[in-house]
Amino acid sequence: MGAFRVPRSRANQTHQALRGEILAALKPVLFDDYRSSYTARAELEAAFASKMRQRHAIAAHSGTIALFLALRACGVGPGDEVITVGNSDISTTGSISQCGAIPVLCDVALSDYTIAVDQVENLLTNKTRAILPVDLHGHPANVKALRSLADRHDLKIVEDAALACGAFDHGAPVGAFADVAMFSFAPFKPLGSAGNGAMLVANDDSLADELRLLVSYGHDPQHNNLPPGYQNYVAEGYNVPLDGLQASLLLVKLPYLDEWTGRRRAIVSQLEAGLADTTARLPRFRAESSPTFRSYAIAVDRQGELHQGLRAAGVEAVIHYAPPIYDYSVYAGMFPERGTLTATKRLAGEIVNLPITPELTNDDVDYMIDVTRKLLNDG
Ligand SMILES: Cc1ncc(COP(=O)(O)O)c(C=O)c1O
């Protein structure tokens, strides 16, 4: 099939509009002193930390590796349990398993699809080390409520905000109530690079130091008393920083994030008005939650029919997070709690994600509403 009339992303249009700024930002990394690449990364980290009102931001190669590093920095290791959700990306559970820890799945709320906070306490054991809530589709999980629970039980919170750059909760940018939060810069994310990328944010100085070490080989830039030219490694780390070209592109884009988030919300308001009287169940949010919308996830009875029908009509709908994580073959025989995850299972069979990209016109959105209504037989 050719190009979609309403695609998931029109970032290329935005990149064209910012062409001059982008090329000027990329130039030093390509043609100046090699340190320009490090400078771009450091500038992005500083700008991002300030935007997210956090003391520290550490740029990494991808959200997947960044989640793993965040858990490691929080001390998660073999035999620990980490409570998370089953309606997410494989990297959410994968990051836990790769630390040698055990992901324990909590059910989610049918209203906004995020972790059912009232069910977390029942899952605690003496092995629980951390909670990993996910801001699914850009909907903030109620991490403030989890914070008090975590503090009572001496647990860390690593927030998977991969999809939620630009979202606020309880008056603060998402991530504010976590020990570490991760934002992905993969191309379809609310702040997308042209490749892979992610940012970790943290307020705690020693956690941030540990994250910096893990991103860069475990190399300590302080030489202490070593002879000149000698290196000091204080951890076995990885080599997974964000590369300078992506950092330069993101530095150009970051100042526009609020404008784009506003446009995403305006598109959703138009969709809400156009679909309110249909059989589709629209997500509902807590009063304090101010989502960004990577996509607009609606729940319907005939998921496959709507998904295929929209795509045939040129609307690039997708189904995110089906089946639930525990049904992937890699997890065969795992997750004995699967039978208790009724909302997770139900949503996996109902969600259809309508495309949202800030460049959509009101006409594009009207077209999407029209096609959706017809396919739902709602006229
Ligand atoms: C909820 C969630 N967490 C983590 C990730 C991993 O991010 P990345 O693609 O940057 O590795 C994704 C990617 O789509 C995601 O959707």
Image: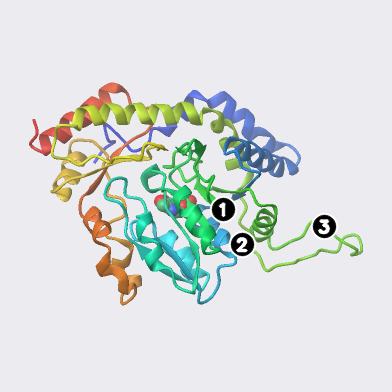
From this viewpoint, which residue is outermost toward the front?
Answer: 152
Return the residue nearer the eye: 152 or 292.
152
Tell me the distance, in whole angstroms, between the alpha carbons under discs 3 and 2. Answer: 20 Å
Considering only order in the chain, which callout, 1 or 2, is on the residue closer to the N terminus? Answer: 2
Rendered image quadrant of residue 102: bottom left
**Residue depicted at 50% across the width and 54% down the height:** 148
Name the residue that disc number 2 marks: 73
User: Mark 1 or mark 3: which is in front?
Assistant: 1
Q: Amino acid at mark 1?
A: Val
Q: Residue 283's x, y, as percent?
A: 28, 41
106 to the left or right of 370 = right
Considering only order in the chain, which callout, 3 or 1, is on the residue closer to the N terminus? Answer: 1
**Are there few (<14), some (14-19), or many (20+) residues within 10 Å of tag 1?**
many
61 to the left or right of 341 = right
Considering only order in the chain, which callout, 2 or 3, is on the residue closer to the N terminus? Answer: 2
**Are there few (<14), some (14-19), or many (20+) residues within 10 Å of tag 3?**
few
Q: Amino acid at mark 2?
A: Ala
Q: Amino acid at mark 3?
A: Gln
Name the residue that disc number 1 marks: 180
Tell me the distance, in whole angstroms, between the alpha carbons under discs 1 and 3. Answer: 24 Å
Name the residue that disc number 3 marks: 222
